[in-house]
Amino acid sequence: MLITSRGTGRWVVPKGNPIKGLDPHRAAAHEAFEEAGVSGIPCPTAIGQYRYEKRLKNGQSRTARVAVFPLSFVRQADEWPEQEERRFRWFTLPDAAAAVEEPELRTIIAGFRAPESVAGVGTRALMWFRRQTSETFPMLRWFQALMPKQGRFFELFEDHAATLVSGADALARMLEGGDIATHTAEIFAREQEADDITREVLQDVRRTFVTPFDRSAITDLIGSMDDAIDQMNQTAKAITLFEVTGFRPQMRDMAGIIVEAARITAEAIPLLRSLGTNAGRLHELTERIVRIEGHADEIHDAGLKMLFRDVGAAPVNPMDFIVGREIFGHLEKIVDRFEDVANEIQGLVIDHA
């Protein structure tokens, strides 16, 4: 999403000055709504910075520095404050990079990757077909078992990564105030789908003669990915069990980091098909996951401290602290599991690139 600048009419990302009382990523999300009517799930960790010459009302200019935050799009309003003052347009990433004037912003956009469409009916249909053909034609299953092959590891990894994107999106939307039952059902469905994919990978490991990586590396990678969606499932169960309906700002910020970690994972997994060529990019992506995991730890600690302070200062049920700590703990574990995925990918790069 790009908008036009009010002064020059050039294409830019929605942006503005810091807003008192709002963290930078929340201020960026506020500007996205003010200028383009866009709302979504912001990640608290910036993906980069760029500089440009800001023209002042007195005719002079000064160098402004802009931190850019990823925001997972949820909706665009029918009306917004600056609707009549700017134009907006959805671009493909290459076209957006070509449309902006600032070289550093162009680099940030060109280096960004949107997640692929989530796994769903196609993946489930494929799983069903493979099971049905094996059960209906046992001779075919026996014959396939004898044939040397490389398996479908890369396709299955990518299908699993898509479930992570979908599950993270549902979790974040729930914490941003979405319908809990609907988003919980989505997470449960994606977790079951991920389990099917994981079983398929483990079966391929056993029946495949030639594997792209060491068998232990394959099982460790899919296991760490499955742990991430399992932990999302546990979080949704805890929210349902304790009937939590309101979520603290730090919880929503951690969910934003989870969305970003899932997006990065979905970009990284297809690059495993050519480790030598993509080693540099994979290093950048895994490094970002490790960095945002550290940021999530800071948010987690600040959230717990604020929760303890609020509960201690007001006549409320002490269970509020216990339940809040439980939710915080689950969210932290999700981010930790994504760091495990990053470590597994980095290990593959070291061993094979």
Image (cartoon, grey):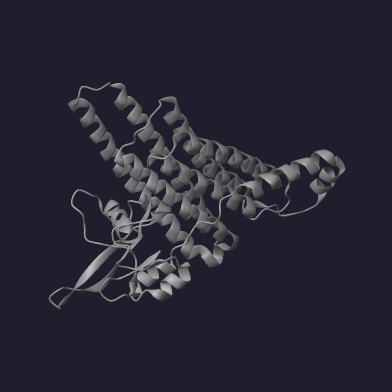
In the picture, the quarter occupied by the C terminus is bottom right
Measuring from the top left, give residue 326's x and y in whole percent.
37, 30
Looking at the image, residue 282 sits to the left or right of residue 24; the answer is: right
Q: Residue at x 44, y 37 (%)?
A: 179
Q: Residue at x 28, y 58 (%)?
A: 81
Measuring from the top left, give residue 325's x and y in whole percent.
33, 30
Which image quadrant for residue 63? bottom left
In the picture, the quarter occupied by the N terminus is bottom left
Image mark count:
0
128 vs 57: above or below: above
Q: Residue at x 59, y 42 (%)?
A: 194
134 vs 5: above or below: above
Q: Is residue 130 visible?
A: yes
Q: Residue at x 75, y 41 (%)?
A: 131
Nearer to us in this view, 183 or 207: 183
Nearer to us in this view, 277 or 161: 161
Looking at the image, residue 201 sits to the left or right of residue 161; the answer is: right
Measuring from the top left, give residue 196's x and y in whole percent.
64, 40
Q: Is residue 352 visible?
A: no
Q: Residue at the far right: name it.
A: 139
Which image quadrant for residue 193? top right
Nearer to us in this view, 85 or 126: 85
Q: Residue at the far left: name it.
A: 58
200 vs 271: above or below: above
Measuring from the top left, give residue 347's x and y in whole percent.
51, 53
